[in-house]
Amino acid sequence: MPKFFITALLLLFFVGFSQAQELKSPNGKFSMRFSLQGNGVPTYTLTYKGKQVIKPSKLGFELITKGAATASGGSDANMEQKAVNLQGSLHDNFTVTDTKTATFNETWNPVWGEVKTIRNHYNELAVTMNQKGTDRQMVVRFRLFDDGLGFRYEFPTQKNLTYFVIKEERTQFGMAGDHTAYWIAGDYDTQEYDYTTSKLSEIRGIMAKAVTNNLSQTTFSPTGVQTSLMMKTKDGVYINLHEAALIDYPAMHLNLDDKNLVFESWLTPDAQGAKGYMQAPRSTPWRTVIVSDDARDILASKMTYNLNEPSKIKDTSWIKPTKYVGVWWEMITGKSTWSYTNDYPTVQLGITDFSKAKPNGTHGANTANVKRYIDFAAKHGFDGVLVEGWNVGWEDWFGNSKDYVFDFVTPYPDFDVKGIRDYAKSKGVKMIMHHETSSSVRNYERHMDKAYQFMKDNGYDAVKSGYVGNILPRGENHYSQWIVNHYQYAIEKAAEYKIMVNAHEAVRPTGVARTWPNLIGNESARGTEYQSFGGSKPNHVTLLPFTRLIGGPMDYTPGIFEMDLSKLNPQNKSHVNSTLANQLALYLTLYSPLQMAADLPENYDRFADAFQFIKDVAVDWDDSKYLEAEPGEYITVARKAKGTGQWFLGSVGGNEARTSNIKLDFLDKGKKYVATIYADAKDAHYKTNPQAYNIRKVNVTSKSKLSQFVALGGGYAISFVEAPGK
Ligand code: NOJ
Ligand code: CA
């Protein structure tokens, strides 16, 4: 018998036996396989260019069983229900009852973004399964794109699975080797960690060191890590694991079985330890695996957005990419304070009389200082001014499990809301409101309508919210289902008021901004503030785009020019671990439609020639070209501004000095440009000589090449202006 015939027979037997299904990506580079293994256990695999990315990995859930105590009555129906309730396992005994395949190919235009048009192209396989003995149905829907795989669980309306509570999701991601991982510790309450680079097998040994202090933190496992998780195989394949469309569900972490190198989903529990309250019909978020042998493709992937629903906001004309300054860094560095008085050891809203309090003389959000920032914004063409510490309550705002911390409408006596509103308007500058909730989530929801109306009445179209400290209701976690729903509620409620949202300490984004484009920023990672709390690793910014930014933009707040923070506040011994040129490049490499120039006006005045780049750089783009990328080492990207067509380029380096070699072939053919290059000087170094930069102008075309030195913790930034004439 010919060999191929035997193989075909064997394959048929195997396929028939395990009810296997195969799917290929549109470009044929990916293939995935679904099958039932052993005792009807749903299992999938993924290969990329013939290499195994996900080895056979199980799918399913463990449910919380209600048990005899909750099943009452003696009727047959009740007894049946009781039997169903006792079935905790939703991960075996399945048979496949239906499979459907489909192809989808469309383009859509984001309201803001890195590119003008996004292609959403995939092949889909939906497998409907029935669980023997319980008659429960579950669908797993796979979408295979040219840049990776997304899949989710769906629970159609059915008799035997109506309401259910998840004890744990049992989605596995079996790794085919001991990959290099770029990870932060799994934590129910914070993502504000520096990244660690290690082999998967080394995570356990390093975990204790990787968990640095935070005002609210709850780690759960010595091998638990967060998504988006970036990895690299030893033969150069880049793998990113994350999730898309996290709606009404807890955030997923990954727990590694480090003997077998298998990650399993680990959801964030609520105060009772439950991991998800479900009611059919319902779908989970998508689990995503983005893969390429070229790291640049990971950064350019739009899969996470594609797995989210189109915009639910019809008129998006009020959503505006924004470059802003703010009364902020001076508090973060300790040069000034959010609080107004030092008179009281504790304050209570409605009881403490702030009009009688003696001002402490360090309150940053005073009218004169705010006007100074408005003047600075107007002079240099910024769109907005953020002011923190404007409202009463900052004298003791976290750490005491206090419910009623802020009311979001009562200013301190020295902050003239109406005067500032009129002054900003006369200068053509938009004010950005700050709502620190102190994680008192219910209190914020109680005040939200009034607070947003107050904003509109006073000319504010954007809010920066924050969730510092432990969540109230007590025992809840920052990323549990109920709190995820709160962040979503705030976004949707803000949309009703035509307010843009930038939430700090909220759950990390999962592409939800496609559906709700008024979510123009999130922090949800270790931002620039940590440069003032002891510093971040110099290569931190080369990792954020591969991890945190996969789900959406970050309000990283770049643009620090004075790295020695004792110059702002003698008590502050921190150092900003970055060169000045690196700070400029961040406006390109850390994509966001919301970008802050975070340093003090006086520091920008000292370096007016470098500041010119921050003034010029755009915040919304028609096109983006990733030119160089390696996680932890470097990222170089060129972007074409929306509206003007002007090109800008940014490049950041990490823990080693290097030479960046790029071609400028992204520039429009046949045109001549003057490139203004803001770069590290030869002797620049993030620690010892961060302010050593030079600025040069060079004539270039799309045929030009550039070889540019990048210091340790350094970078360079370029603005291209079309040369007049031919
Ligand atoms: C932490 C935020 O990340 C920071 O930007 C803010 O200034 C403080 N919380 C106070 O709300
Ligand atoms: Ca923060």
Image (cartoon, helix red, strand yellow):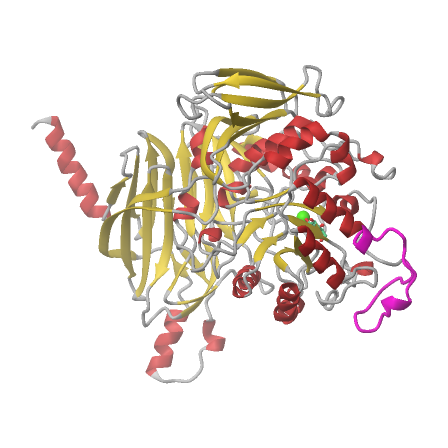
Q: Is residue 360 magenta?
A: yes
Give the prevailing secondary structure in the magenta stretch.
Answer: loop
On screen, 514 above or below 687?
below
Report the front residue among 696 and 451.
696
Q: Is residue 541 visible?
A: yes
Report the front residue among 505 and 462.
462
Image position, residue 24 (x, y; %): 26, 39
Kindly give the residue lying farthest to the left in the view shown.
Answer: 1
From the image, which quarter does the N terminus lie in?
top left
Image position, residue 348 (x, y; %): 81, 69
Over which residues does the magenta segment extend? 342-368
Kindly give the residue lying farthest to the front in the view shown.
Answer: 725
Image side of residue 633 versus residue 315, left or right: right
Image position, residue 93 (x, y; %): 31, 57
On screen, 511 above or below 396?
above
On screen, 94 above or below 176?
below
Image side of residue 382 versus residue 491, left or right: right
Report the front residue among 539 and 67.
539
Residue displayed at 50% across by 24% down = 724
Q: Is residue 254 magenta?
A: no
Image position, residue 267 (x, y; %): 51, 54
Q: Is residue 260 visible?
A: no
